[in-house]
Amino acid sequence: MVTPQNEVQKIFSNNKGPAEFSKAYMAYVGSVLNKLNFEKIGAFIQLLETAREKQQTVFFIGNGGSAATASHYANDIGMGTRTWDKPFRTIALTDNVAVITALGNDHGYDSIFELQLKTLMKAGDVVVAITASGNSRNILKAIAYAKDKGATTVGLTGFDGGELASMVDLNLHVPTAKGEYGPVEDAHMVIDHLVGAYLGLKVQQEVKSQI
C-alpha cells in the first residue's frame, strides 16, 4: 500500500530545485495561514489580556519543536511586551531541564507537565498546550488536571486536532495533513508574533494615554 503524499512532499516532488521548492513551500504556508480562525485568535488575545488584569499566570507546554515554541511564547508575551508594573505573568514549563528530568526519571515522562502544574498553578490561571498532533500523553494529562482544578485551557494544534481539540476551552487549529510538522509549527510561531505584536502595541498605547 502506497502512503499518500502530504502537500510538502508533493511540493518537493514537483520542484526543480531549492529555490522553486522555497517559493512553493512559502505559498503553501500562506494558504494554511489564511485558513486560520481569526475570531479564535482574537479570543486568545482577549484571554491573555484578562489574565493580565487579574494577575493570573499563563503556562505554556509542548514537546520537541513545540517546546521551543512554548519558550518563545512565554518570552514574547511576558518579556517582549515590556510591561513591568502590570506584567503578563508567563511561564514555559519546558525550560527547567533539572525539573523535567527529575520528574521524568521519578514519575515518568507523561507526568512532567502535570506535576509542575500541581506545584505552580492556581485556579483561574491559563494553560496553553502547543502540539501538532494533539495526542501527546503528557499534554493531555496536564490539560485534564488543569481543567479539573479550574484553569482555563487553550490548545494550539495541527493535523486533525487530536484528542486535545475537544478537551480545551479554546482551540486554535492549524489545518494540515498528518505529519506536516513544519507548516504547523510555522503557523504557531506566526500566531505568537501576531499576539506579541498586538499586546506590545496595546501596552505602548496605554503608556501614551497616561502621559
Image (tube, rainbow, N blue to C red):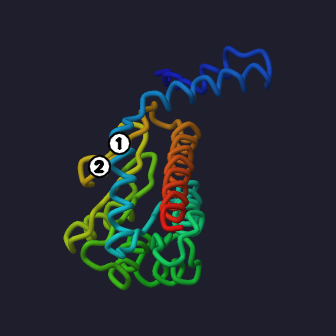
Is 42 left, or right, of 186 in this rendering?
A: left
Q: Picture coordinates of residue 143 (x, y %)?
A: 30, 64
Could you say which is closer to the camera, residue 68 or residue 207? Answer: 207
Residue 34 is left or right of residue 186, and the answer is left
Q: What residue is pinned by disc 2?
A: 163
Residue type at mark 2: give it: Glu
Look at 78% across and 15% down and name the residue there.
16
Q: Is residue 57 above or below residue 99?
A: above
Using the image as rendered, state which of residue 122 and residue 104 is in the foreground: 122
Disc 1 marks a residue whose amino acid type is Gly
Residue at position x 44%, y 84% in the image: 106
| x and y, in percent, of residue 57 in the image | 39, 74
Residue to which mark 1 is pinned? 161
Query: Where in the figure is residue 37, as x and y percent of width and height?
Result: 37, 35
Query: Which residue sits at x=24%, y=48%?
Result: 166
Q: Secondary structure at mark 2?
A: loop
Cα separation between marks 1 and 2? 7 Å
Q: Secondary structure at mark 1?
A: loop
On screen, residue 9 versus residue 141, left or right, reads right
* Rendered view: 169 above or below 108: above
Give the quadrant of the C terminus: bottom right
* Residue shown at 67% from the left, 14% from the top: 14
